[in-house]
Amino acid sequence: MLMSNTAAVITGGASGLGEATARHFAAQGAKVTLLDRDTTRGPIVAEEIGGYFIETDVTDEASVEAAIAQAQSQMGALNVAVNCAGIALGIKTTGRDGAHPLAAFQKTIDINLTGSFNIARLASTAMAKNEPDADGARGVVINTASVAAYDGQKGQVAYAASKGGIVGMTLPMARDLAQYGIRVMTIAPGIFGTPMLKGLPQEVQDSLAAEVPNPARLGEPNEYARMVAFIVEMGYLNGEVIRLDGALRMR
């Protein structure tokens, strides 16, 4: 699938990895719709790239159904869905303040894992109605996990569980959607220079970057975006998780 023929929805598209992906897609000639809850930043990014913005709660079935239908109508097509929406909470299973709040764990699962599945199931249902190309392809779903799915650190139990779930659903989802010509891939980023991380003190950023073997720096959001675009265009990639982490293995 060529980027110039791509019509994509990108969750979390108002900032971070999602914004970088939206900007890269638009620069490559793709049609882009940002799905996000940020009604301040979202419309600004959409206008700057010549795309669309739809306020969307990925955990809400009706919200996503309406967003997918509207995005498909505005772009005239839908063949790519990229899940970048997510949260990260640093709470230990138990500690000085007592047990990990169950509501915080559930919220992380709801947004990161259930939200990704909600987008994937409804976007793929829309894609299944597309006319196949010469290779039989109708679309691509790309989810975002994390290296924490494999080597989560202390305080990351909820985050690691949510991202581990995304890793676990990659292959069965790809098998489910194979008959429709829809591929499913997951990227597991390491430590990236997103706005959330850039808000940390410089010495903390430097310490994190030093943990990356090679190159010894934070990942750049545009590097994630370029990987997403590569997956879209490389039609033989399917059912796999790609670590994008500079060989980082967190301790």
Image (cartoon, rainbow, N blue to C red):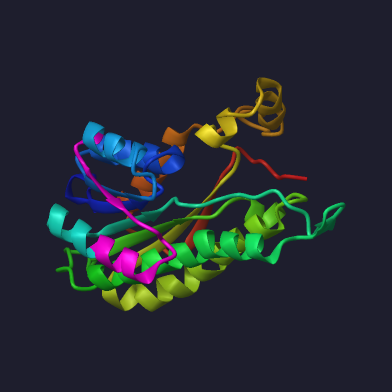
Find residue 131 and report its image quarter. Answer: bottom left
Answer with left or right where residue 152 lies relative to residue 33: right
Viewer-side residue, 69 vs 217: 69
Q: Is residue 187 above or below residue 191?
A: below
Answer whether residue 188 is magenta in the image.
no
Q: Is residue 66 above or below residue 42?
A: below
Taking the spot 54% from the left edge, 32% from the top edge, the residue there is 193
Q: Is residue 72 above or below residue 248?
A: below
Assign the C terminus to one quadrant of the image.
Answer: top right
Find residue 115 and report its image quarter. Answer: bottom left
Answer whether residue 64 is magenta in the image.
yes
Viewer-side residue, 201 vs 214: 201
Taking the spot 24% from the left edge, 73% from the top edge, the residue there is 128
Viewer-side residue, 162 vs 98: 98
Q: Where in the figure is residue 213, as x and y percent of width and height?
A: 68, 33
Q: Where in the figure is residue 220, as x and y percent of width and height?
A: 49, 32
Q: Is residue 229 visible?
A: yes
Taking the spot 28% from the left edge, 73% from the top edge, the residue there is 125
Q: Where in the figure is residue 155, as x and y percent of width and height?
A: 75, 51
Find residue 19 and report its image quarter. Answer: top left
Taking the spot 69% from the left edge, 32% from the top edge, the residue there is 208
Assign the N terminus to one quadrant of the image.
Answer: bottom left
- First to last magenta residue range: 49-68
Q: Is residue 239 visible?
A: no
Residue found farthest to the right:
96
